[in-house]
Image (spheres, rainbow, N blue to C red):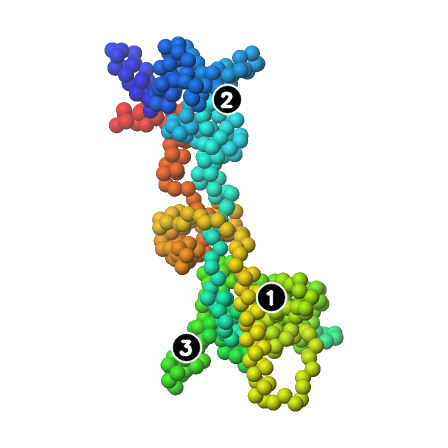
Amino acid sequence: MFAYVFRFIDNCKKLTNGILGSLNETELHQSLTFLLKTAQQDSFGCEITALKKNKSLKSKSDILQLSPFIDATGLLRVGGRLKHASLKYDTKHPIMLRSNHHLTKIMMLNEHLRLFHAGPQLLLSSFREQYWPIGGRMLARSIVRKCITCVRMKGKTMEPLMGNLPKARVTESFTFQFTGVDFAGPFMIASKKGRGSRTIKCYLCIFICFATKAVHLETVSDLTTQAFISCLKRFISRRGRPHYIYCDNGKNFVGASNELSRVLRLDLNSITDFAADRGIRFVFSPPYSPTFGGLWEAGVKSAKFHLKRITGNISLTYEELNTLFTQIEAILNSRPLTPLSADPNDLSPLTPGHFLIGRPLTSLPGSQGTDIKIRTRYQLVEQLRRHFWERWRKEYLAELQQRTKWRTLQTNLKEGDLVVFKEPNLPPLKWRLGRVQRLYPGDDGVVRVADFNTYRGIERRAINKICLLPTAEDSEVLEDAAVLPKAGRMSATIPKRAGHAEAERGETRNKM
């Protein structure tokens, strides 16, 4: 742009033989020198004035260690100690710039694009062959960090602060009153023993108590809604009716919730009484958000740990697999909830089995007296129950205090921010774009779930599965850098093409 301005001024001074056509290297170098002088006057005005008067720089000047001088063209250059090195003049004495100046930023952005999105180290090394930016290392890192293409290729998701535990995890309640549920599998089972058997799929459904971490395992034939409702009925018959069931957004769980709602609506008795006595409320986590169900995901991992070591590649029958699931359930309910203490008298660590039957399920039953009265026995059971919950409060809850990961507080999303959804089955440049439409902050003010506007409509996602893109201001600066001319070796690439484009537009305007 400045080269065309200078050409226009020169042509106005000449009555004839004005310069036409594309820009040449001399014009581009003249305009770039003018811009560099202007930037240096803005950044090093006092130092340039002192050097022109042959005065020494102040001792607090941040460029004193570079021994600056003014060359024949009036540009401030680095003096340095490489005078006798076998290097080019521009490399031995690069032009000095401030990294916070706008010209320095767009020139380094242009170099970043020219080097095909090079990293900070290569970017700074290449830029220093002609220019010496003060604080250039931080600028190079900032440019790479704000480049949209580099951000998308890196695919780093946001990590909000680990949230507080829900009330159901830290409140005394009946076992399985607040329950998490998930599916695992498929597992191959044989239709019968011996020859002629065929293998079919089955699945594991795990129910886990929020307060005591007790688990209940059920074998399910398929992933349909009817199969899950049947599994839920078996669970309720053995463990009691839960008040809340927490699960992910699987279609079978959504279908089960809709089916229960339909049954409630069609019930001929009092809907209020039925809902108060037997109603179950489903709480769904956001789609593609396994971290919201870490409790049941850990339960699935523990169940698979034992299952894979026992079965291997063997196809069991339905009866054998169901028996194995029940044995694994007893083992998981006998795990200590807290680390073992150093007290030699503490021989029984607290386990989920204590809240189910008063002892670990895999331990031997203790001796029971036959002459204990009913009232005394009832008081003993109540005393044991209170003892277990007292240990639960003192030993188990203290272990939940620490944040094992996601410990730092980051900046929250804002409405209108542009993000990409991280999809493991697609390359980064094909991830879908989304615009933040609505935020859902938690009770601590940290946003972990948001609604995004995509070409598919409004979608809800957890923010630990998205990548935040740079702001619009950074993108505009990056676009401006694509057409910035640079002297020397860069004038043969981008500036030349830009000059041809401007010449073609000028010829078009002349024809019109």
Query: Quadrant of the image for the C terminus?
Result: top left
Q: Which residue is mark 2?
A: 129
Query: In front here: 408 or 178?
Result: 408
Q: Can the viewer see residue 222 in this picture?
A: no
Secondary structure of the residue carrying tag 1 is loop
Marks 2 and 3 in Cβ contact (< 8 Å):
no
Q: Which is more N-terminal, label 3 or label 2?
A: 2
Judging depth in this view, the residue of 344 and 332 nearest the camera is 344
The span from disc 1 to disc 3 (Cα, nearest Å) is 39 Å
The image quadrant of residue 203 is bottom right
Q: Which residue is mark 1?
A: 337
Q: CA distance from mark 2 to mark 3?
A: 73 Å
Give the mark, 1 or 3, whose residue is nearer the N terminus: 3
Q: Which residue type does callout 2 highlight? A: Glu
**Drawn side of residue 313 relative to residue 504, left or right:** right
Q: What's the residue type where badge 1 is placed?
A: Leu
**Residue corresponding to mark 3:** 262
The foreground one among 343 and 200 is: 343
